[in-house]
């Protein structure tokens, strides 16, 4: 199935600065696996060491959260749009001197 | 809603002639009218944070005639705020934000009451601070406070109008409504500190918090007026570059630790620890690398010593100001390390000294022995050596 994955701003540096990536996949899990195959740096942002999707990264097929579908086994249809929606905390827009602020390695 | 909270929502209030004139563009709309404007006047709304999101929020809620407006913040206005925090002016720089905000909002609308809380919202004070308010608006800028606001709102049964921004993107939703989801239903856990975007990727286009804060203000007014479809069970995503809004469905998570069927969080917890900032998951901060003070570096350079200055910031930061150093962004250092000569004395710097500490730590681990961190970065250099270097 030809699907489109929308990459959110915070993850674009790890996905070749792409806003969206189009690929072929039959399930959400397969689509994400292809995505991190293509962009290796993205892996640790999407998956914990255990191989599970990180809990602060939500994945939607069209407008529905995959947690309420069949998780990563959720089947895809041609033209489906997968959204990756990580939590963002900003309200002031600068992370200078924040304790949590750390350059990516 | 408890008895004590609901009382003020029905107390008899009227509008003065001045108020009728002031709110005439509301009053002539049937969706608001006199009844709606009186609802606004009776309403009590608390804005947590009076920064990028809080500034437009407070301005619009005050202008709209929300009768009692609470503000929680403990910062002072600084020059870097003015690019987006339209509540403040240049003459406010250095003043406590709440003092400046109170003055500005009183000028905008002297008919309303402003209640300042000049404090950091903590697990100890949050329930007391939030309790007297009908609606809470989350305009904070960090994960611990967002989880704190969420949990306190769920425990108190208050709507939580949420907004968040990152560079060109924003999220808006309304949490904490009966039957609706909460922030933890959306994100049960925050990212560990090591995975938050770096300084170099921070920043925000100043209009973005204006847009997101205004959307939050609109949701607050709708909740008070009881009109339209509030953003409950929906997450609104805004992409300023594509100029596109999208909407995702949010569901109440039956396993949610705070609003689920069997909640495990029944009182406020330690949110710094929960977010890994004090916890063990936080990556160890590199602090014990050899350092050199800006004055010492200056003197050694003046005396003609051969010192290689390595700048580990991003190219766009280099354009703001630089010390003429050799630029290798921290993220590129591992694959560009061959460009450096380990026989030479190297001093690494960044903006404040944090990224360059990691660079020094990395270089020492791969065998460089003559490498030092410029203490305090280019900011300290501007303070201690060359005041013509701009700070950012």
Image: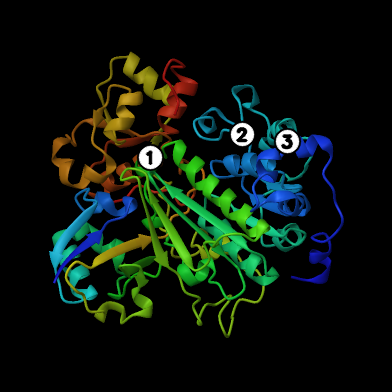
* Furthest residue in direction right, as rendered: B12
Residue marked by disc 3: B22
Say which of marks 2 and 3 sits in front.
Answer: 3
Q: Which residue is mark 2?
A: B87
**Circle 3: element type:** helix
- Circle nearer the N terminus (3, 1): 3
For the C terminus of chain B, the quadrant is top left
Are marks 2 and 3 in one subunit?
yes
Q: Earlier in the sequence, mark 2 or mark 3?
A: 3
Task: Specify the subunit that label 3 lies on.
Answer: B
**What is the chain letter for disc 2?**
B
Tell me residue B13's x, y (percent): 85, 51
**Dot 3: within a 10 Å radius of its alpha carbon, few (fewer than 14), some, or many (20 or more) residues?**
some
- Identity of the residue drawn at 34% across and 36% down: B372
Is residue B188 at least partly visible in the picture?
no
Label 1 element class: loop
Q: Which residue is mark 1?
A: B290
Q: Position of residue B2 (x, y in %)?
A: 78, 71
Same-chain status of marks 2 and 1 = yes
Where residue B7 appears, as percent x and y from the top left, is 84, 64
Q: What is the spatial separation of the Cα atoms under label 2 and label 3, in whole angstroms?
A: 20 Å
Q: Are the two marked residues, 2 and 3, in contact with CB atoms closer than 8 angstroms?
A: no
- Relative to B29, say whether B326 is above or below: above
Among the two numbered marks 2 and 1 on one chain, the one whose residue lies closer to the N terminus: 2
């Amino acid at each position: 199935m030809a699907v489109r994955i929308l990459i959110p701003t915070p993850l674009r540096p790890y996905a070749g600065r792409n806003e969206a990536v189009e690929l072929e996949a039959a399930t959400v899990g397969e689509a994400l696996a292809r995505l991190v195959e293509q962009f290796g740096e993205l892996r640790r942002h999407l998956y914990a060491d255990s191989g599970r999707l990180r809990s602060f990264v939500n994945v939607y097929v069209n407008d529905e959260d995959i947690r309420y579908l069949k998780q990563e086994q959720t089947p895809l249809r041609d033209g489906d749009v997968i959204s990756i929606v990580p939590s963002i905390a900003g309200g002031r827009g600068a992370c200078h001197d924040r304790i949590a602020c750390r350059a990516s390695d | 809603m408890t008895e004590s909270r609901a009382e003020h929502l029905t107390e008899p209030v009227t509008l003065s002639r001045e108020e009728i004139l002031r709110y005439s563009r509301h009053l002539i709309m049937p969706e608001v009218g006199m009844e709606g404007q009186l609802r606004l006047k009776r309403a009590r709304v608390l804005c947590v944070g009076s920064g990028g999101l809080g500034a437009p929020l407070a301005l619009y809620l005050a202008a709209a005639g929300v009768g009692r407006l609470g503000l929680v913040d403990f910062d002072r206005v600084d020059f870097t705020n003015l690019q987006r925090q339209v509540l403040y002016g240049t003459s406010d720089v250095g003043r406590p934000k709440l003092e400046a905000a109170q003055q500005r909002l009183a000028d905008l609308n002297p008919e309303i009451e402003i209640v300042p809380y000049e404090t950091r919202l903590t697990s100890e004070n949050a329930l007391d601070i939030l309790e007297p308010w009908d609606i809470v608006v989350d305009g904070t800028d960090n994960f611990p406070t967002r989880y704190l606001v969420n949990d306190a709102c769920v425990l108190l049964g208050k709507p939580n109008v949420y907004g968040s921004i990152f560079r060109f993107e924003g999220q808006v939703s309304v949490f904490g409504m009966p039957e609706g989801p909460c922030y933890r239903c959306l994100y049960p856990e925050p990212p560990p500190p090591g995975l938050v975007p770096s300084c170099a990727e921070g920043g925000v286009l100043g209009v973005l918090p204006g847009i997101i804060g205004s959307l939050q203000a609109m949701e607050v007014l709708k909740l008070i007026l009881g009109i339209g479809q509030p953003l409950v069970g929906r997450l609104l995503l805004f992409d300023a570059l594509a100029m596109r809004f999208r909407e995702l469905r949010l569901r109440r998570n039956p396993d949610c630790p705070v609003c689920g069927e069997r909640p495990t969080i029944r009182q406020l917890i330690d949110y710094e620890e929960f977010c890994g900032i004090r916890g063990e998951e936080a990556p160890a901060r590199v602090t014990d690398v050899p350092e050199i003070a800006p004055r010492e570096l200056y003197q050694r350079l003046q005396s003609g010593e051969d010192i290689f200055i390595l700048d580990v910031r991003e190219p766009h930061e280099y354009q703001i100001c630089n010390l003429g150093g050799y630029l290798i962004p921290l993220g590129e250092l591992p694959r560009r390390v061959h460009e450096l000569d380990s026989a030479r004395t190297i001093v690494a710097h960044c903006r404040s000294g944090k990224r360059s500490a990691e660079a020094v730590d990395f270089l020492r681990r791969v065998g460089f022995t003559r490498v030092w961190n410029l203490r305090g970065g280019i900011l300290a250099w501007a303070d201690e050596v060359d005041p013509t270097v701009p700070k950012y």
